[in-house]
Amino acid sequence: MGDFAAIERDLLAALKHDGARLLEEHLNDPALPGPENPPQAGEENHGPRPKAVLTCLGWITLRRPYFYSATRQAGRFPLDAALGLVDSYSPGVARWMCRAGTLAGSYQAASLDLLTYAGLDIDARQIQRMIRPPGSQHGPVARGRKGRCSLRSRETFSVSAPTAPARPCAARS
């Protein structure tokens, strides 16, 4: 029969890989009803832009419209907001990062926990940035509130996405 643990691990990896491809195809389907968010006054649609996103299933690439206003010198990706993306992480992965980073003894331990239990290779510095975004205070923080991660109860975390405007660039991801 072989090594049951290896069979289990390999099957899970294959399922996650196929699931990530199906999710990517689904989210990039032009027929998929997207957010009713046409360009606002003064905005131009600069076409689809790719973005690599880490999901609970693995990495996918989104192709989503980019709207830019030269007057306001600000751009936006409506699909990112509709999906609840936090930087390059799905809401599920962002929640896992918050939970692991808040409850583990260190960001390195949180990184190892995510690799061990979810198969997600996330650098400890990325977990630290999720919990303490650049520019946030570096000292102790109030219990239950750390950067983008809010502790709602012993077991539940919520994540808030940043609201900084996007800048125009040809290869923004």
Image: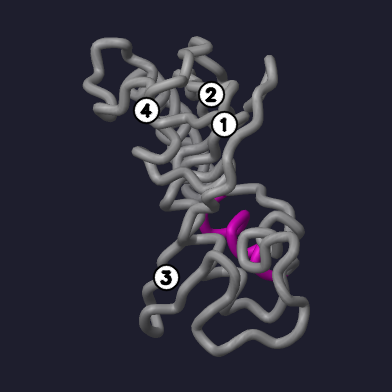
> Which residue corresponds to the image point at 69% horizontal and 21% vertical from the top-left?
169
For the record, the magenta segment spans 109-119
Q: Position of residue 105 (x, y in %)?
A: 68, 81
Q: Position of residue 119 (x, y in %)?
A: 56, 49
Q: Earlier in the sequence, mark 3 or mark 2?
A: 2
Q: How is the image coloured?
A: one colour
Estimate the spatial distance between the alpha carbons at disc 4 and disc 2, rounded to whole Å: 30 Å
Quadrant in which residue 171 is drawn: top right
> Which residue corresponds to the image point at 46% horizontal and 59% vertical from the top-left?
160
Residue to which mark 1 is pinned: 72
Q: Is 117 inside the magenta-drawn segment?
A: yes
Mark nearer the viewer, 3 or 1: 1
Query: Mainly helix, strand or loop, the magenta region?
Result: helix
Mark nearer the viewer, 3 or 2: 2
Residue 2 visible in the snapshot: no
> Which residue corresponds to the image point at 75% horizontal and 66% vertical from the top-left?
108
Q: Residues within 10 Å of mark 1 (few under 14, many from 20)?
A: few
Q: Position of residue 138 (x, y in %)?
A: 77, 77
Amino acid of disc 3: Phe
Amino acid of disc 2: Ser
Q: In the rendered structure, find residue 23 and report the number of the disc placed on it.
A: 4
Labels 4 & 1 near each other (Cβ < 8 A): no
Q: Earlier in the sequence, mark 4 or mark 1?
A: 4
Q: Quadrant of the N terminus?
A: top left
Q: Secondary structure at mark 3?
A: strand
Labels 1 & 2 near each other (Cβ < 8 A): yes
Q: Earlier in the sequence, mark 3 or mark 1?
A: 1
Residue to which mark 3 is pinned: 157
